[in-house]
Amino acid sequence: MKLVITGRHIEITPALKSFTREKIAKLDRWVDEVMEVHAILVVEKHRHVAELVVHGRHLTLSARGASADMYASIGTCIDRLEKQARKKKEMHVAKRRRPAAGVEPAPAAEDRPVRRKAAKGARASAGDADSGAPRIVRSETFSKKPMSVEEAALQVREAGLEFVVSRNERTQEVNVIYRRKDGSFGLIEPER
């Protein structure tokens, strides 16, 4: 770790340097790899201000503390940096967290209910959690008015939806028009 200390109106003593290095070592617990730390220590009349900027492998943290004692100002900065680093690490861990032991594994693909992105204004309803029935998270309604395949594709494009369920005006069957990954549209029709 590279430590750069800049002093304004203060002499940087070896004791101040070692104190800062010891306090920064507390951050190793929360930051993967501390690459560089820049400490700016300023004395203004009776105020001692410390500002620390920590550059880690994947993040940069900064904090500022002021008090009547430079050591207390550095301690305040370290506490604030530690709080920031802990919050970032907890958010990162929460994203990657696996299901806890004792939790049932996810159902197989054929048993899993199909989940779709609901449109704005969709209603949410919850099933009985103890019954074992699939829980419907969101549901939406579609227009009873029959429309052509072209109209349905236009609705998908204009509304920014992933799919539209509609009744085909020619066959009176229910169709699904969906947006493909390549940008074109797909059509799902029932067997005849």
Image (cartoon, helix red, strand yellow):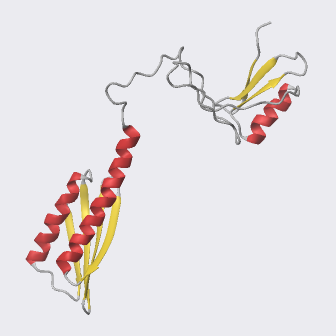
The N terminus appears in which quarter of the rendering?
Answer: bottom left
The C terminus appears in which quarter of the rendering?
Answer: top right
Task: Please determine whether, in this image, residue 45 is positioned above or below residue 140.
Answer: below
The image shows residue 34 at horizontal and vertical percentages of 24, 57
Residue reaching furthest to the top: 192
- Quarter of the image where one finds residue 71: bottom left
- Quarter of the image where one finds residue 41: bottom left
Residue reaching furthest to the left: 15
Q: Residue at x 25, y 63 (%)?
A: 36
The image shows residue 14 at horizontal and vertical percentages of 9, 76
Q: Is residue 31 left or right of residue 151?
A: left
Q: Residue at x 78, y 20 (%)?
A: 175
Q: Is residue 158 left or right of residue 139?
A: right
Q: Which of these two is toward me, 68 or 133? A: 133
Q: Which of these two is toward me, 111 or 180? A: 111
Q: Residue at x 49, y 22 (%)?
A: 130
Q: Which of these two is toward me, 118 or 148? A: 118
Task: Please determine whether, in this image, residue 74 is positioned above or below residue 112.
Answer: below
The image shows residue 67 at horizontal and vertical percentages of 25, 81
The image shows residue 69 at horizontal and vertical percentages of 19, 82
- Quarter of the image where one finds residue 110: top right
Q: Is residue 147 left or right of residue 42?
A: right
Task: Please determine whether, in this image, residue 186 is positioned above or below residue 48.
Answer: above
Q: Residue at x 35, y 56 (%)?
A: 59
Q: How many marks?
A: 0
Residue reaching furthest to the right: 170
